[in-house]
Every structure is written in C-alpha cells, then in structure tokens.
Image (cartoon, helix red, strand yellow):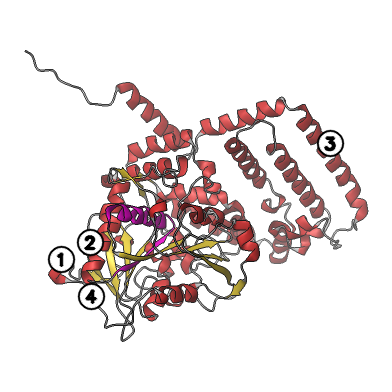
Amino acid sequence: MPEVKVDNTIPSWKALDASVHAALSHAWSSISQHSLLLAWMDWATHLAASPGKCLELTRLAFEQAAQMQIRPLERPAGFGKNAEAADTAQADDRRFRDPAWECWPFNMLRDAFLMQERWWDEATHGVWGVDRHHEHVVAFAARQWLDMFSPGNLPFANPVVLKRTWDERGVNLLRGFDYFHDDVTRCRQSQPQPGTEQFVVGRDVAVTPGKVVFRNRLIELIQYAPTTGKVHPEPILIVPAWIMKYYILDLSPHNSLVRYLVEQGYTVFCISWKNPDADDRDLGMDDYLELGFRAALDAVTAIVPGSKVHATGYCLGGTLLAMAAAAMVRDGDERLASLSLFTAQTDFSEPGELALFIDESQIALLEAQMADTGYLFAEQMGGAFMMLRSYDLLWSRLVGEYLLGERRPMNDLMAWNADATRMPAKMHAQYLRRLFLNDDLSEGRQPVAGRPVSVGDIRLPVFSVGTVADHVAPWRSVYKLHYLSPAEITFVLTTGGHNAGIVSEPGRPRRQYQLHTRPAGGGYIAPDEWQATVPVQQGSWWPAWSEWLRQRSGAPVEPPQMGASGRRYRVLGDAPGEYVKGK
C-alpha cells in the first residue's frame, strides 16, 4: 500500500493573502483602511437616513454662521486690541491660551475653527443606528483631520509665531529648519532623539546598585542591594510591561521607585524583559508567564527562602501578574503575600482610546505584517500613542520646535519613552485578540497552561493604582477589578498620566491622590461615587503604598545574600544588565 503524504503547508491562497495584507500594512502605516471605510460607510449611510439629525446639523451651521457675523461687532476690531474670550470653552483651550489669540483677525480664525470642531463633533455623535466603535473611529478621524488645519499649526495664522518671527527677524524659522533637518537625518539613520545621549542606561538612569542573578532567553532578574541594616522578610518582585523597558521604575536617583523601596527597607527584585527580534516570533502568553513571571518567582523564593512575595505589576505586566496569581490559586501555589497593580486592567470591555485601533480588520492586518517580520516595530505602537495625544505629542512639538525655534529640553522620562521596544508576533496577537478584542480574562476564558483562569479566585490583598489622565488604561477600567474579585482592594486614584502618575516621588509639586480600602467581600461602590466621596490627600502616593506593604510584612531581619549560587542563581553581572540595553 503506497504511503500517504499529508501536506501541512499553508495553502497558497492564504500565503498570497497574507503577503498582500502585509504590504497594505506597510503602505498604510499599519492602519486598516478597510476598518476606516466600514466606519465611514456605517456613519454616512445612517446619517443620510436621519433627516432630523441632518436638519439639526443644518440649523447649527446657520447659527454658527450668524455668530461669526455678529462677533466682530461684539469685540474691538483693531489689530492688537485685547478682547474678552468668546466663551469659557475657548478660554480653557490650551491651544489658544496665549492672549495674542484675542486680537483680530486671529480671534476670528480661532472661533471659526472651534465652531467647526463643535459641528463635526455633533455630526459624528448621536447618529441613529451607528455602531459605537464606528462612531468613535469616525469622530477620532474627524478630529485628526481638523487638527491638521488648526490655525495654531499654520505659521501665517498663528499670532505667537508671527510675533516671534517679527521680533527675531526670522531667525526662529532658521533654527526651526535646522531642528527639522536634524530630526529627519536622525530618523533616516535610525538614531535616537536629540538629548537622549544625556540619559545613558546604567550611567544616568537605571543606576540603583544591584546584580543580575538570573537570565534566560526572555528575562534578566535584577536583585537590588540593600541600603538599610535590616529589611522586611518579604521581598518585592516587580513585573513591568513587556512593551516598555523596566527602568521607568528606576529613572534618575531622585525619582526612582526602586531606590525608594530599597531605602524603605525592602528587598527588591525586578524583571528586565528582552527586546525581542525575529527569532522570538513564536513566544506567546504562556512563555511570558513561564519564562518570565514563574521563572523570576522561582529565583526570588530560592534566594529568599521561607518568605512569601509581594508581587507588583505595572501596565500589562500587572495584567500578566493577575493571570499568574489566578493560576497560582487554581494550582494551590501560595507563595504570594500580596498583589500591587499599577495602571493595570483586568477587564478590557472599555479599554479606553486604544480601542480605536483594535477590531478584527485592524488585528488581521497587524498579524499579517508580524508574520512577515516576526515582531511589531516599536515605532508603530509609539505612533498609535502619538495619535491619541496628537496635540501634546505632535502638533505642540512641531509648532514649538520648527516654527518658534524652541527645542524642548529632554528629561529622563522623555528619554525613557524614546527607548522603545518591539513585541513578538505571537504574544502581541494573543493579547490583542484575547484581552482587548475578546475580553477573555474578565470573562473567565483566558487560558494559562491550557486551562482557563478566573480573576474572581484571587483572595490576596490588592493595592491598585489608577491615574486621572490615563489614555492607555483609563482609571475607571482599572477600577473594574472591584466587581471581578472579592478580595480586599485598596484603590488609589492619583493625578498624572499613565507614566507620570506612577513616577510620582515624594516632594514633587502639584501631586495629590485619593485612597480607599474596600474590605474583602465588601459592597460595590460605583467609580464616580467613589471619586466624589473619597477625600483628597496632598502629595505622593508612594509613602501610602510603602505603609500598606509594611502592614503586611514581618519584622525586619538581616538582608539576604545577593543571588544563591548553591541553587543555580549566581551573580551574572551588575545591574542594569544587558537586556535593557538591547535596541
């Protein structure tokens, strides 16, 4: 009987489709045009079938046109004369806060632009029958398009730029052109942003003394040297997100959370993820759990035997930690003393503005591209964040540097943000589909080692931090842990964004936070009610977290040795290690 050969190769038509989609992804900067077209068609066809909405938009357009004709009569018309802002919304708009915008004709340009923004906001919201995701996409696209033509971004329509050009006889534009040329050259040569050379990893940032005590193909584990005579017996293990380099938590000495914890008498360990390349394309979620968190936890408990561990996760590192903690409960592993989750979501039903870039069409396009390269380029993720905060991260910088001739000084947080990482194809596709698209973790479908886990199994005390201005993990989404787990949850809401709210060292001005502990099994309080009733406290939340950890830690003991050579965890080198330096 002849041997039957089974062809397990990918069908040629699928390979062809994948190649085409990968090419489209490169051509359109990883933005799915199909997704945009579907959203536009959904909005346009429903708007066309909504005569009442069309009449309302027509009425608003005529009303705005009438206002534009009346407004010159309500304020001084002479160039250079100041006038009161047209309304509170205009006065509070950061783009037009300079008093020069109250002078004619710039006040008219500003008012016309803001009216157009309001009209498009009305036009893209509240159309009967439009899918909610499509509504958000169309509204976002309209804002991005309008921002391109904001009078603040146009040199001949921006009074601040014109005054600076007049005062400096155009020298500001020459400086701006020089900055532009330098940026283009650096971009073409894949060089870092100017000023980042002042923040070298291991010299200026990530300088808290420590040793690398474990390394595998995915992580290095750093153990930090004690600075106190005695330490609490329970060590802290930090799990940062794999989409960022860990030293966001160990920036300069004055704002390093790691250094702060060490000075408070804790033994601190931190995972440093490898920056993946094409050879790591097949690393998935289970690999990050097994080679990442579990390997690190094994090392920590071997170096500090007999003590439970305070596990701490930041961003998606916190999400990964929540999965691991739920799996440990399932498997009867009791090595954790507590969980601390910083801007970490466990429910992705409302993941914030990143959802604009996440639907079936968009993920399919990214999967095709990653299948071609083996990873997602760091610049693609950075581009998505830039679009979400286009004024702060794009337009204000272009105006300030290229038109006003003011190069924004680099700081440690900006240098860290420019030191981006890649993401392996399998892992990135899994967390986009399972977490963002399908919300498998909160629904009890997320598999760990082949079996699903439930966040509801977690009974450890939890310290959870959300930030008021977070565009990546909105605090109300982070807060949803309250109805997923019956555990004792201490929730902190602090000022700042996704990163600056966490890097919030004591002594930093204009910092405040709210803190409340819900006891285990306690009743649910809605987030808006929580925010309205919990008192505001001034300063950094770091001391409150340190006190929370202290209350759940034993009496101080002698510090452990660095590494445990007798248990395969010998010292491999000085912190910050090698993986963090990978480009």
The answer for how far apart the CA atoms under marks 1 and 3 are is 75 Å
In the foreground, 102 or 423: 423
Q: Residues in magenta?
A: 308-332
Q: Amino acid at mark 4?
A: Met
Q: Secondary structure at mark 3?
A: helix
Mark 2 or mark 4, which is nearer the start of the sequence? 2
The answer for how far apart the CA atoms under marks 1 and 4 are is 12 Å
Q: Quadrant of residue 313?
A: bottom left
Residue denoted by label 4: 562
In the foreground, 369 or 571: 571
Tell me: residue 40, above or below residue 229: above
Residue denoted by label 1: 568
User: Residue 333: where, in percent of width, then height?
Assistant: 27, 58
Q: Secondary structure at mark 1?
A: loop
- Residue at 55% over, 48% down: 353
Mark 3 or mark 2, which is nearer the start of the sequence? 3
In the foreground, 446 or 39: 446
Q: Quadrant of residue 274?
A: bottom left
Q: Residue furthest top?
A: 1
The answer for how far apart the CA atoms under marks 1 and 2 are is 11 Å
Confirm or deny contact between disc 4 and disc 2 (CB under 8 A).
no
Q: Amino acid at mark 3?
A: Arg
Q: In the rendered structure, find residue 215 and report the number of the disc placed on it.
A: 2
Q: Nearer the viewer, mark 1 or mark 2?
A: 1
- In the rendered view of the protein, which quadrant contains the C terminus? bottom left
Tell me: residue 499, above or below residue 36: below
